[in-house]
Structure formats: C-alpha cells, structure tokens
Image (tube, rainbow, N blue to C red):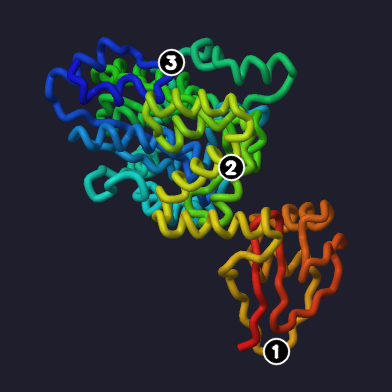
Amino acid sequence: MSTKYNPLLERGIEEIITEEGLEKKLKSGKKLRIKFGIDPTAKDMHLGHLVCLHKLNEFQELGHKIVFIVGDYTARIGDPTGRIKAREFLSKKQIQENMKDYLSQAGLILNIKKAEIRYNSEWFEKEKINLIMELALTQTVARVIERDDFKQRMKKGQDVCMQELFYPLMQGYDSVMVKSDVEIGGTDQKFNMLMGRNIQRKYSQKPQIVMTLPLLVGLDGEKKMSKSYNNYISLTEIPNIQYGKIMSIPDDLIVTYYELAARTSGKELKKIEQQLKDSKKRKDLKAALATDIVSIFHGSEASLLAQENFNRVFRDKKQPIEIPEYKIKRKQCARLVNLIFDKFQMTPSKNEARRLIEQRGVRIDGAVIENPNSEICLYDGMVIRVGKMKFLKVVKE
C-alpha cells in the first residue's frame, strides 16, 4: 500500500475486519462511504469520541465520504453495550435537546460541509413495526444473546429487555440504509458493527469493513471515558477546565492520551516513553499534552492562557487571570446547592453540586462551605470556586 495509507491503517487501530478487504477497497480508487454513528444520550461529545473523529478525518482527507449518523431514534432504546442494566428511556424532547450541538462539536475535527449527515429517525419513524418484524427475521435469538453483556447479566439473574435485543439489529440496519463501506467505532462496538455486516448480507449488500479503535480510559484511570461514569473531558468545555482535567489524568495514561487524543506520531511517542522514565519530566510532559489538546478546540493562544491560569491556581495559589462573571442588579439570597446548579450552572446536576459541597469542593472568597443548604447572599466582588478550576465572580450591574 502507498505510504499515504500508513497512518490510516496503522495508527490508533485495534482491529480491521477484514484488513485484506479494506486494502482492496482502498486500492480500487473508489470513494468509500465511511459510517460513524452516535446516539445523543447526553449533550456533550468527549475526548473518547475524539479517537473516532480523528480516524474519520484521516479518511476524509483521502477524499472518502463520511456518513455521520445521529441516532435520534436508537437513543430512545439505548445501546446495551457495557451496561449492567437497561438505560433509562429518553423522551423525544430530551434527545432533541441533547443533539442540538452535536454537529458543531464534530465540526471541530471534521469538515461537516463535506460530510453526509443522517438521522436514523428518517427510516425508523417511517417503517416502524413492519421493519422490526423484518429485521427480526434476519437473526436468531441465540446470535443476539451471545454478546458478553447479556450473558453476564443473565448469569446474575438480571433482566435483559426486549428493546435491547433489537438495538444491534437497528444499528446494523443503519448500515443498510446508508450503504456503508466501512464502519468505525470503539472496541466495545464490535458486536454491533459485525451485526451490520450480517444484516447487509441479508439485504444483498456487500458487508461493510469493521474498524475498531481503542477505548480512551477516563479520568478515573479505570473505566472507558463516559458521561455515565463522570470521568470525561468534554470537547466544548472552557480551556481552563479542559486543561485542568487533562493535568489530572494518571501518569500511566500520558502516552495513551498523546497517541489517541493528541495524535502524536510514532517517533515522537517513543521519545515521550523514554522521557517518562524520568519522574521529574512527567509534569512537563503532561503540561505539553494538555496544551496540545486544548489548542485543538480553542487555539494556541487560549491554550497558553489556560496553562498560565493553571499555574496561577496550583503553583502560585492565585486566582485565574480572567474569571467568568455573574451579574446582579439587587441583593439575591438562595441555598448554596441551588446557586451552584440552577443560577451559576457550574455543575451538570444538583446531585453533583451537593456532592462537591459536602466533599469540601466549594469555596466562597477562599472559605470552604460544607453545608449544601447554607443560605448565601450574593454581593459585588464575591468569588465562588467549584472544584479545582471553576471560578465565578459576582458583579453588580
């Protein structure tokens, strides 16, 4: 194969099914249709998605067509992959709210104007029960329940809902509808993507090539990055927060983040691996990593400012140079937990706000407040700190 395909076939790849099939397709000179699907079960995309977006970008730069599927219908069912119980049912309104900014987030890496954007409600809303029955005839129960997630749950006597059995079939049907040549996803999606190959055969299409990519481990250093595990770094977080979260990753993930998130070349990775043997260099390497990743989404200037703010807070024990403001016209008083979540929107949920307060993670003008129900009256110049890097300043209009 030409050297121009080396990064595509070698960097950040776990498995290709089949590699010979992909090489044949690439050699043919045909413009391939590269499928990537994502269910809007939450509002933000995170660095775990970035691994796939980078690979999609490589295909796009070689002239292939990216088919970006937003699973606005399958999100109602919920992908059972890696779940110990069924996902909570999402309403149509919740899904629409979640997916509002998906394309702009993907557009940070991909050329969205050149991509084909599809929503799988296009076919599932139209076909409904007839299609479900048709799909059911393409597979056996034994084939569907052989996935490890279901086996483990059944061994423990836990329920597997009927709707979950249909999820991989529906993801597979997406491949039929967009005539996918290649589908990209994390290693946890292998079963679903292979199902796509099977269903394409049933509909007289050539089976897609399956390309699995490594899963990026989250901030806890254990589980895959996921909003469900609250161990994620959002693509849209402000530079200071993004930078601070990257600085908090365990040292043994530094090389992995360089490879999968920052897309560092093989030669550079070897240098980094050697430098990491010197414990004194780890902090500097992590700082360079954080600067690289933040610059992808916010530019080099914002990235350098985030680095400076991080050093001011953790090294110099000062406030960041710039702090977001919350303006008030008159005296306002409310319970601290309500201020943090409802008014300031500094946490994704009220439970998270309560947890941070109780764990001494909230300060007002430097003083720790431990009671979520404390009545707080806002005043001009008040500075609230939530967690390690979120600051807010109250300003009177």
Q: Is residue 330 above or below residue 68?
A: below
Residue 377 shows in the view: yes
- The amino acid type, in three-letter code, at marker 1 is Arg
- Which residue has dot 3 on it? 139
Q: Reading the chain from its start, which is encountered first: label 2 or label 3? A: 3
Q: Is residue 158 above or below residue 254?
A: above
Horizontal side of residue 334 vs 137, given as left or right: right
Q: Residue at x 48, y 25 (%)?
A: 214
Q: Comparing marks 1 and 3, which lies closer to the viewer?
A: 1
Horizontal side of residue 19 vs 186, given as left or right: left
Quadrant holding the C terminus: bottom right
Horizontal side of residue 21 vs 80, given as left or right: left
- Packing grade of label 1 (10 A; few <14, some 14-19, many >=20) is few
Whole-angstrom CA distance, mark 1 to mark 2, is 37 Å
SS of the residue at dot 3? Answer: loop
Residue nearest the viewer, comparing 208 with 138: 208
- Disc 2 + disc 3, Cβ < 8 Å: no
Whole-angstrom CA distance, mark 2 to mark 3, is 35 Å
- Disc 1 + disc 3, Cβ < 8 Å: no
- The amino acid type, in three-letter code, at marker 3 is Gln
Q: Residue at x 49, y 12 (%)?
A: 143
- Which residue has dot 2 on it? 232
